[in-house]
Image (cartoon, rainbow, N blue to C red):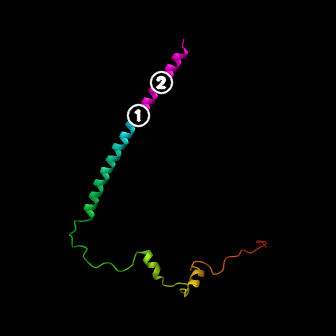
Amino acid sequence: MNTVKSFWVGWGSLCVAGGAAYYFAKKSINEDRANRFEAEQRRRRIQESLEYTATHPPQSSKTNVGPARSDNTGSPSQEAALDPAPTRHAPHTEEQRVREKSKYETSEPFRAKKGDRFS
């Protein structure tokens, strides 16, 4: 017959065994993940180095000696200042600049019509 003491000893040993099994399984799983990650990183580095050497032949030090680029093609922040058709003139005074609306804002705000919309 089971006694109270044997009952708790049984459950206690079961919990300890389960905890130990979990600990060692987790340790093994993390080790496998780390190994797979390292292998993947090595494979990617090798692949990138092969792609880079295939597409970029070795360059001499005098390849990019030409003058600096002075055009703004492909740079949206530089092209924004060169707007071909601005909608408003530049303000003349500070007060005009503060009160001015951007070219995307309407000069008068939208006012919804009151009343029945179905008639």
Please tell me whether residue 105 is drawn above or below residue 40 in the rendered image: below
Would you name the residue on which mark 1 appears? 25
- Among the 4 quarters of the image, the one containing residue 61: bottom left
Would you name the residue on which mark 2 appears? 14
Using a 10 Å C-alpha cutoff, classify the residue at mark 1 as few (fewer than 14 neighbours), some (14 to 19) or many (20 or more).
Answer: few
Q: What's the amino acid at mark 1?
A: Ala
Q: Nearer the viewer, residue 37 or 56?
A: 37
Residue found at x 49% / y 20%: 10
Question: Distance from label 1 to label 2 (Cα)?
Answer: 16 Å
Question: So how many labels did they put on this image?
Answer: 2
> Tag on residue 76?
none
Left or right placement of residue 28 versus residue 117 in this view: left
Magenta residue span? 1-25
Please tell me whether residue 119 is drawn above or below residue 93 in the rendered image: above
Numbered disc 1: secondary structure: helix
Please tell me whether residue 11 is drawn above or below residue 30 in the rendered image: above
Question: Residue farthest to the top?
Answer: 1
Please tell me whether residue 41 is drawn above or below residue 99 in the rendered image: above
Q: Earlier in the sequence, mark 1 or mark 2?
A: 2
Percent coordinates x, y for residue 100 in the rendering: 59, 82
Residue found at x 33% / y 43%: 35
Q: What's the amino acid at mark 2?
A: Leu
Percent coordinates x, y for residue 44 in the rendering: 32, 53
- Among the 4 quarters of the image, the one containing residue 95: bottom right
Q: Nearer the viewer, residue 102 or 47?
A: 102
Left or right placement of residue 95 versus residue 54 in this view: right
Percent coordinates x, y for residue 59 in the rendering: 22, 68
Q: Determine if the magenta segment contains residue 39.
A: no
- Among the 4 quarters of the image, the one containing residue 57: bottom left
Q: Give the main secondary structure, helix, strand or loop, of the magenta stretch.
A: helix
